[in-house]
Every structure is written in structure tokens, then in C-alpha cells.
Image (tube, helix red, strand yellow):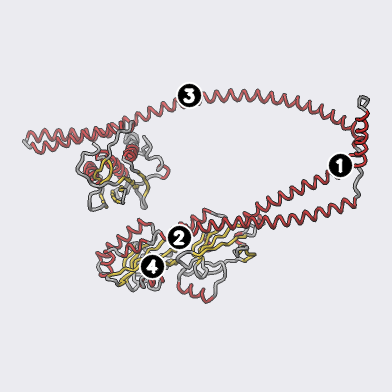
Amino acid sequence: MSHMTPSSKQIFTKRFYYRKKSGVPVPKWQRLLEMILFLFVFSIVLWVTATLSNRYALGLVSERGQQRLDLYATSLKSSLEKYDYLPEMLSVEPKLLELLKDPKNTNKLKLVNGLLARMNRTSGTLTTYLMDGKGLTLASSNWQAERSFVGRNFHFRPYFKTAMTGGTGRYFAHGITSQQPGYFISYPVKAEAKIIGVVVVKVGVEDLEQSWALTRPNNRVIVTDEHGVIFITSQKEWKYKSLYPIAEEIRSQVIKSRQYDDAQLDHLSVQISEKTSEGNPILIIPELGDFSENRIGQFLVQSSGFSGTDWTIHFLSNLDSRRPIVSVALLVVGSVFGIIFVIILYLYQRRQVMHERWLSEQREQAALKMARDELEENVHQRTQDLTLSNNELRLQITERRKVENELRTMQSELVQSSKLAALGRMSAGVTHELNQPMTAIRSYAENAAALIGMDRVEEASANLKIISELTDRIGRITGQLKMFARKPVTNIKPVSLTNALDNSLMQTMSRIRQDKIEIRKTMPDTPVWVMGGSLRLEQILINLISNALDAMSEVDDKIKRVLEIQIHTSQDEVSLKLCDTGPGIDKDLQSKIFDPFFTTKATGQGLGLGLSITLGLVNELGGQITADNIPGGGACFKVTLQGAVKEKELNVGK
């Protein structure tokens, strides 16, 4: 203090005096009154915050719910309307008209049953069937099933009545015969402007319901009819119930019509707690609550009419999503008031502390020195701990580098072993593939020599021609490995797919006859042309046919071996399907079957290059190839190529 100037002494004296005067404590009654006022204001602000944040959160839920409602409505519409064309298309099928005119003809009945079964299987619908003008089902895609529709009379169904008046019938009901719910689409069958029958397609909705249940498990999607009965829902237990009670007269009529089989159309145990400003109700559904977490199961219901029907689609948004928003808002406001409360307490305490500070300066200095000494000791101890930790870390790094070097060495050895194993499999596979044509060449050469000795020159020439073809085949087999290693230069031109298929079947016919394989072909009557090369196209087909024959050789002799070949054309593309009755493709292996050197055959029975080369050839021709299993067992390969128009005869792709 002796070194301070007079002006600084005066300033210090004023500050000390101000501190002493400002440190006068506040009376207790005044502090209690201010605390009560503060708590009152705090309660009012919390209530306003909760109200506004709840309203805001409800608006967000409503906006998202409306978007999802529109999305689900669009999904439902696209799922059902994509089958609208099917009944109308079938109504002009000549085979159906012939059966309606001659319903007792068993041959025509068999043809129509097969046609409807194939159409139903291709489109993915539940059932497709044909009724006469009196509602009697003449033919059906499920004609072989235990619950077949054939012989059943559905004249009482509204979709039949609508179709008989010339319109397109649309109706949802629980099947009385099949015991499966579905969406029925009907269309009249006319002959000389007179309605003589009705064709009906039944579409399933179970996949759609499961998709809805998995997409938003906390929310619910339901579709109700004009009476409020729930017939499509993501909540399985709600099916054929209603959100609200139905008038007893209407309920009795619906039950009597057996639209929903024997369902009693009970209503759910719900109650409306409030309505939003848009008029949407908020329902309390106790069965969806969680009393262990104090949740009562509140849902915002948003509804929309379904175009073209008297259905209504409802989206029930779980209002539990409001809670985080309200909680955050209350937490923020509470935190702000907490900070203000701390500041007020600080100001109160500051008044009481300031007048005693001059007494505690010495104690503070002593405490500061003690704290400084303790801090220095802690820093020293911490430094030692960090030094030890760094040393341990260096040892760990050294050990890890050693392990990494050992791992690299092991990886190099593993790669080398894999290369040697692949080389062994390749050698065994090439030997196996070349053995058959070499044996055939030897046999045909011996026969040719014998025929020449008997002056049967023409037959000997035929054998020599076959030998030439077999040598070409050997060249193609060895060329596969070159093709796998280096992509060849392509020369893509129009080529006949049907000719390539016939040539491929001819080259594998001995194997087909030996294994007693039945060939079923479904293709257009006229030749089909695609962009490609005859050699590459035949190689693709031979690889796929051989793959199917190998697969069917593994099945039991009791199972019928069938190779089904289908060719379908569109405006720009041609698709070829080859389906077998083998064991199919393991789901775990479907993603690997086109990989090089991947094979499920025993060692020495294949290189694992066939499908890989086939994939490369298809890509080279600008096409696509996929593989999948078919119902009932067996694999199906689909090749899609670019369509082409027939041009003058060219030596293409050679």
C-alpha cells in the first residue's frame, strides 16, 4: 500500500466503502415474497410453453401424417389398379368365348383352366376365373385346388351384378370358398354385343398389409368401407372391426351378405379425447398404450377418400412423437429460468458476501497458496502417469506392427495357396470338358474308317463332318478361358435367336436323351431376331442348357425332369427364360453364382467359369441376365437382349 499514489488510495477507499454498503443483506420477508412471485411467473411460462410446443408438435405430426396418408393412398391405388387391364384383356380371349358357348366341352374347359392358371401365375394374383351369365363358375386358375371355384355360383356378389350390367365391378370381400380376403375386379364377356359371361380377377392384399406394418410400426394404416368396417389394416387384430359403433340395421345387413364371412363387425374400444383445428380426431386406444411407461396410446386420425370407390383410408399417427418436442421446449425454458434463478441467488449472496470479503482476504490467500501447492503436486503426479502411459503405448505400437507384419506374411501365403488351388481346379475342369469331345472324335473316326472300308462314303463323310464340329467345340472350350481373361472385340449384328436355340439343343441332344429330359418350348410362331452374334449366342445358350442338365441330374428319378424354354418379345427387347426342375439355387449362394471359379460341383467336375463367361457374353451383347428360384423347386435363368429386325442373311458374329 505504501507504493500507491494518493489518487489510487482514494479510489481503493471508495471501492471498499461501496462494497461494505452494498453488502447489506435483504430482509427475509422481501426475499420470500420475491421467491413466490418468481415461482408463479415460472409456472405460467411453463404452462404457456407446454401449450404452444404441444400445438407446434401436433402441427408437425399432422403435416407428416398427411404426407404419409397421401403416400399410402397412392401405394394402395397403384397396387390395385395395376390389375385393372387383366379382366378386360381376358374378356376378348377366343378360348373363353368358345367355352361360354359350349360349356360342356371338356377339351375347351381344360384349355381355359390352363390358360387362366398360367395368366394367374404370371400376374401374381390370387385367383382368375370365368362365370357364365347365371354366376356359375365354369373355369378357374385354382381348378385343381381342394377349394376350387369351379362349380361355385357367385351370382349374389355385387361385382358379378355390376359386370352383367356392362360395367367394371370392383369389390372387396373375404372369400367364402377360399377363406382368403381379396379385391375382386370383374369385366363382362360379350359375344355379338350380348353379355354371356363374366371374367373375374381376385387380388390379394396380405403383402400390402405386411409392408404397411413393417414400414411404420408405431403408426397404423387402415382402410374402411362405406359402413366404416376395417378390411385392410396394418394392425392384424383390427380386421373386420370398426373404429366406431355401426348401426345395428347396417351391421345385420353386412353380416347377412357374408361380405366378411362370419365376422361380427365389433367396434374397437376407442374414445375421442379432442379434435385438432382441422377437425381431425385424436383417439385414445387403451390396447395400444404402455402403462409401464405411463403412455395411454393416443393417435391422430387423418382420413382421405379413395378415388373411384366409397372406401376411406385412415392414417393413425402415434402422438408419442410429441413428447420429445414438448420435453425439449420445457427443458429449454426451465434451463433459462434456472439460469435466471441462479443469477438472482448470486446477486442475493453477493450482497451478503461483499461486506465480509475484506475479512476473508487472508484466508483466501492462504487457501490459494494451498491450492497452488496441491495443483503443482497433482501436475507432477499426472506428468509421471502420462510418462508411464506413453511408454506402455510405445510398447503396444511396436507389438502391433509386429503382428501386422506377420499378418501380411500369412496373407501372401494364403493368396499363393489360393492361386495354386484355382490352377488345379482349372486344369481338372478343362480336362473334364475336353474328355467328352475327344472320346466322341475317336469313336466317329473309327466308325468312319469302318464305313470307308464298306464303301459307305456318304455316311463316313457325315462322321467326318461331326468330327470337324467336335474340333470346333474343343476350340470353343479352350477359347472360354481366353475370353474370361481378355474381353474380345465385339461385332454385334442382327441374328436369329430361334436358330441359335435350335442349334444349341441339337448340340446337347445326346445328353438330353440320355438323362430323359422333357423339353417344353413357349415362343412366337415367327422367328425372333436379336442384336448379337451366332457363336456367342449359342455359347450362352449351351452354357445355360448344360447348367440346367447338370442341376437336374442331381434330383431323384421320381421327379420329372423338365427343361422349360420361353421366349417373349416386346417393342425393344427380347427375353429368354430357361427353367429346370432341379434343386434350385441356395439363397445364400445366389449372389455368388456369376463369380469366376465359383462352383457347387464336386472337385474336378467343373471350373466355375461357365456362368461367369455367360455373364460376360450377355453384357458384351448389351443385355442382362438374372437367376432366381421358381415355386415348387428348380432354378430359372432370364436373359434379356436387344430386339432386332430381320435383315439380309449375314455371317454375323463370326
Q: Position of residue 384 (x, y in %)?
A: 72, 24
Q: Mark 2: which amino acid?
A: Lys
Q: Is residue 63 above or below residue 310?
A: above
Q: Residue at x 81, y 45 (%)?
A: 343
Alpha carbon separation for disc pair 1 and 4? 86 Å
Name the residue nearer the viewer: 351 or 362: 351
Q: Which mark is residue 568?
A: none
- Numbered disc in front, either 1 or 4: 1
Q: Which is nearer the N-term, disc 1 or disc 2?
A: 2
* Residue 646 visible in the picture: yes
Q: Which is nearer the N-term, disc 4 or disc 2?
A: 2
Q: Mark 3: which amino acid?
A: Thr
- Numbered disc in front, either 1 or 2: 1
Alpha carbon separation for disc pair 1 and 3? 71 Å
Q: Which is nearer the N-term, disc 1 or disc 3?
A: 1
Q: Mark 1: which amino acid?
A: Arg
Q: Which is nearer the N-term, disc 1 or disc 4?
A: 4
Q: Position of residue 374 (x, y in %)?
A: 81, 28
Q: Position of residue 406 (x, y in %)?
A: 51, 24
- Numbered disc in front, either 2 or 3: 2
- Say which residue label 2 marks: 77
Name the residue nearer the viewer: 200 or 402: 200
Viewport quadrant of the N terminus: top right
Q: Residue at x 67, y 53 (%)?
A: 326
- Say which residue label 3 marks: 409
- Say which residue label 4 marks: 168
Q: Which is nearer the N-term, disc 2 or disc 3?
A: 2
Judge left or right: residue 354 versus residue 78.
right
Q: Mark 4: which amino acid?
A: Thr
Alpha carbon separation for disc pair 2 and 3? 60 Å
Secondary structure under badge 3? helix
